[in-house]
């Protein structure tokens, strides 16, 4: 393999290609696509993209769902040697346009699922050259030209940005997180040492491609010559059957998936015998959920993984074993080798004990947000090291790992999607008739649901929800809407979020019920 590809994500796929050229790299819609076939397809798409442009693009947006062509599009973006920006077709066009502009995307690779999103982007004023294999689409088209296929993936340097992902921002706009080839090389190097994945493994792929945990699925599998199986939503109704039919050996999802399978009545002892490894991340993992999953997959080693996007996918791991843990939650475990940790007290000073806000420095740390203004308050320098402030409160465990205690700020995980409550507030305030808006999180079945309290006109819940669906990912659109004459204040004359959370919990209805309109007086 070209040494300039060693340590890149493209290089990991080439390693799988060498190990298992005629084995399936992808099993999607009951169709097997071999490593050789996916490699050749990606070379053709990448070459067509580069040949169709007058110069080297700054960044390529990959607008793709989880259909068979999505993975060739993502791999082609990486093969082009340009920064890749995964984009979710189901996101509102306004949000996707913000990401395109922030990342400097000047060409798109799109898959079968992307036509409605392309049409909405074009209607919103976005006009970018687009390679869209299925055919007609509203953007300026780049042709797929087999004669332009690359001979090999384009090289990358360790400091080059491999991809950019976006997290929720408190300003009301998403924050771009660049991840370098050096970041991913360190990460996957550690995983290669920790796990025994091989060509006979079959990985689940539950995460959307714009969610960083999807990179774990794809490049752990592809670096080992294993197969990846996208898991459609319908599969959860009979998950043991789906897993068995595809001889799946590696499972990775948010803990919410455990609750979902339990509700079907199929999370029974021994129901998932083919699994060798089970991973969960994106939300706190309850001991009860870990116990039930471990019983259903008795042959699997189960791990709870932890890490913000800014620290490259996951940066800590706890191998599960039965026992009693703090708050009946599985610890997040020890931070990866090569990293340093720092705890801060509520004032931002180094903590005097074993509890505080977790800060991490090391080779998986992003160089900083795309917009340097977003760095303020999120990074700090100590003894010549640059630390990322995770905003997560932790307590040191006896084995050297960490117990997760909750968020330091107003950031929450909603079905695995990290969300700043302030972003939802900002979006709600743009709805005509709304003056003030405060969003709170209500615990529900191992995850959280969001509720908005708003002042101004008594805007109907259905109208406010429709407005937010145009601005926010579907997973984080609030489930409940409550109108108030005025927001309650605490003794410091600040909005009393604790009171609002208590009200939202008391007022919660079953999922899908309409929001409410309340008339409340200001608390003194």
Image: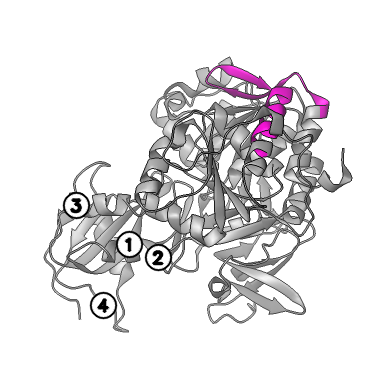
Q: Which mark is residue 172?
A: 2
- Relative vertical location of residue 358 with respect to residue 117 in this rendering, above or below: below
Quadrant position of residue 294? top right
Q: Secondary structure at mark 2?
A: loop
- 324, 451: nearer the viewer: 451
Sequence-earlier tag: 3 or 2: 2
Q: Residue sitting at 42 percent across and 48 percent down?
A: 447
Q: Is residue 196 visible?
A: no
The 10 Å Cα crowd at callout 3, few under 14, some 14 to 19, many 20 or more, is: few
Whether 502 is among the magenta residues is: no
Residue receiving disc 4? 489
Quadrant position of residue 490? bottom left
The 10 Å Cα crowd at callout 1, few under 14, some 14 to 19, many 20 or more, is: many
The 10 Å Cα crowd at callout 2, few under 14, some 14 to 19, many 20 or more, is: some
Sequence-earlier tag: 1 or 4: 1
Residue receiving disc 3? 463
Sequence-earlier tag: 3 or 4: 3
Q: Secondary structure at mark 1?
A: helix
Could you tell me how far apart the alpha carbons at marks 1 and 4 are, in whole angstroms?
22 Å
Q: Residue sitting at 76 percent across and 80 percent down?
A: 383
Q: Which residues are magenta?
A: 18-46
Could you tell me how far apart the alpha carbons at marks 1 and 2 are, in whole angstroms?
6 Å
Could you tell me how far apart the alpha carbons at marks 3 and 4 are, in whole angstroms?
27 Å
Q: Disc 1 vs disc 2: Cβ atoms closer than 8 Å?
A: yes
- Relative vertical location of residue 358 with respect to residue 258 in this rendering, above or below: below
The 10 Å Cα crowd at callout 4, few under 14, some 14 to 19, many 20 or more, is: some
Chosen colour scheme: one colour
- 63, 509: nearer the viewer: 63
Single out the mark in the foreground, 4 or 2.
Answer: 2
Residue receiving disc 1? 427
Could you tell me how far apart the alpha carbons at marks 3 and 1 are, in whole angstroms?
13 Å
Quadrant position of residue 203? top right
């Amino acid at each position: 393999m070209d040494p300039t590809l060693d340590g890149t994500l493209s290089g990991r796929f080439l390693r799988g290609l060498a190990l298992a050229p005629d084995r399936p790299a992808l099993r999607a819609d009951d169709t097997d696509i071999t490593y050789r076939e996916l490699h050749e397809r990606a070379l053709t798409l990448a070459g067509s993209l580069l040949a169709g442009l007058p110069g080297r693009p700054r960044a390529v947006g990959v607008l793709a769902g989880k259909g068979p062509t999505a993975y060739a599009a993502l791999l082609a973006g990486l093969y082009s040697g340009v920064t890749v920006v995964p984009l979710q077709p189901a996101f509102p066009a306004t949000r996707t346009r913000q990401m395109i502009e922030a990342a400097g995307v000047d060409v798109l690779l799109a898959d079968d699922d992307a036509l409605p999103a392309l049409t909405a982007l074009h209607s919103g004023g976005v006009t970018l050259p687009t390679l869209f294999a299925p055919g007609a689409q509203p953007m300026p088209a780049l042709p797929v030209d087999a004669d332009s296929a690359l001979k090999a993936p384009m090289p990358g340097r360790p400091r080059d940005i491999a991809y950019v992902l976006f997290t929720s921002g408190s300003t009301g706009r998403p924050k771009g997180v660049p991840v370098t080839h050096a970041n991913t090389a360190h990460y996957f190097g550690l995983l290669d040492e920790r796990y025994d994945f091989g060509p006979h493994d079959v990985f689940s792929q539950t995460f959307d491609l714009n969610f960083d945990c999807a990179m774990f699925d794809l490049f752990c599998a592809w670096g080992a010559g294993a197969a990846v199986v996208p898991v459609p939503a319908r599969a959860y109704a009979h998950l043991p059957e789906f897993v068995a039919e595809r001889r799946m050996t590696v499972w990775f999802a948010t803990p919410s998936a455990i609750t979902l399978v339990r509700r079907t009545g199929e999370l029974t002892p021994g129901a998932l015998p083919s699994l060798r490894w089970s991973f969960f991340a994106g939300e706190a993992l309850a001991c009860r959920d870990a116990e039930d999953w471990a019983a259903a997959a008795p042959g699997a080693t189960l791990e709870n993984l932890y890490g913000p996007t800014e620290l490259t996918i996951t940066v800590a791991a706890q191998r599960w074993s039965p026992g009693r843990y703090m708050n009946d939650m599985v610890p997040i475990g020890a931070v990866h080798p090569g990293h340093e940790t720092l705890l801060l007290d509520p004032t931002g000073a180094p903590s005097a004990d074993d509890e505080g806000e977790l800060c991490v420095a090391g080779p998986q740390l992003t160089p900083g947000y795309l917009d340097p203004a977003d760095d303020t308050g999120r990074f700090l320098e100590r003894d010549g090291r640059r630390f990322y402030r995770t905003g997560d409160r932790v307590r040191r465990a006896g084995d050297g790992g960490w117990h997760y205690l909750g968020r330091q700020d107003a950031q929450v995980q909603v079905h695995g999607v990290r969300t700043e409550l302030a972003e939802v507030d900002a979006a709600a305030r743009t709805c005509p008739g709304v003056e003030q808006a405060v969003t709170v999180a209500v615990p529900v079945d191992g995850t959280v649901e969001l509720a908005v309290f708003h002042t101004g006109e008594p805007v109907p819940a259905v109208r406010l929800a429709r407005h937010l669906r145009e601005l926010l990912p579907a997973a984080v659109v609030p489930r409940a809407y409550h109108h108030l004459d005025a927001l309650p204040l605490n003794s410091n004359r600040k909005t009393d979020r604790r009171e609002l959370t208590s009200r939202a919990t008391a007022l919660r209805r079953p999922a899908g019920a309409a929001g409410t309109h309340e008339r409340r007086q200001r608390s003194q």
